[in-house]
Image (spheres, rainbow, N blue to C red):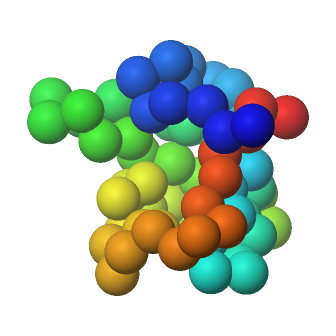
Amino acid sequence: MSISFNIMRVGRTYKLINYGEVFIFETLSITPNDDYLIKIVDTLEQCYLSELYQFGKGKDFMIDEI
């Protein structure tokens, strides 16, 4: 079962699945417009959470805390 964006916390690790792609990321900060600055664990790349689902949410869209 997926969690809601508003219960995500800074410093925790999450797993996002969307259109068959799996991302494991750590939240670094929350922006004033309620987006999250994240660090993808596999590549250490920093980006915003909204960039991971900017082209839509698939039927398999799910976020879970690890």
Q: Is residue 11 above or below residue 23?
A: above
36 up-or-down from 44: above or below? above
* Left or right for 63, reference 15: left
Q: Write the residue at 43% across / 62% down.
A: 47
Q: Could one spot residue 36 in this view of the protein?
A: yes
| Residue found 34% across the figure and 30% down from its top | 30
Report which quarter residue 35 is drawn in: top left
Query: Relative to the observer, which residue lies in front, 37 or 22?
Result: 22
Tell me what residue is drawn at x 50 percent, y 30 percent. Answer: 4
Q: Is residue 38 left or right of residue 65?
A: left
Q: Quadrant of the N terminus?
A: top right
Position of 66 with respect to 50 (left or right) is right
Quarter of the image that includes the C terminus: top right
| Residue extending furthest toward the left | 33
Is 13 in front, or is 59? 59
Location of residue 45 by image quarter? bottom right
**Would you say residue 14 is visible in this rendering?**
no
Which residue extends farthest front? Answer: 59
Residue 58 pos. (x, y %): 53, 74
Give the percent coordinates (x, y) of residue 17: 69, 64
Q: Position of residue 55 (x, y in %)?
A: 34, 81
Give the tally of numbered discs: 0
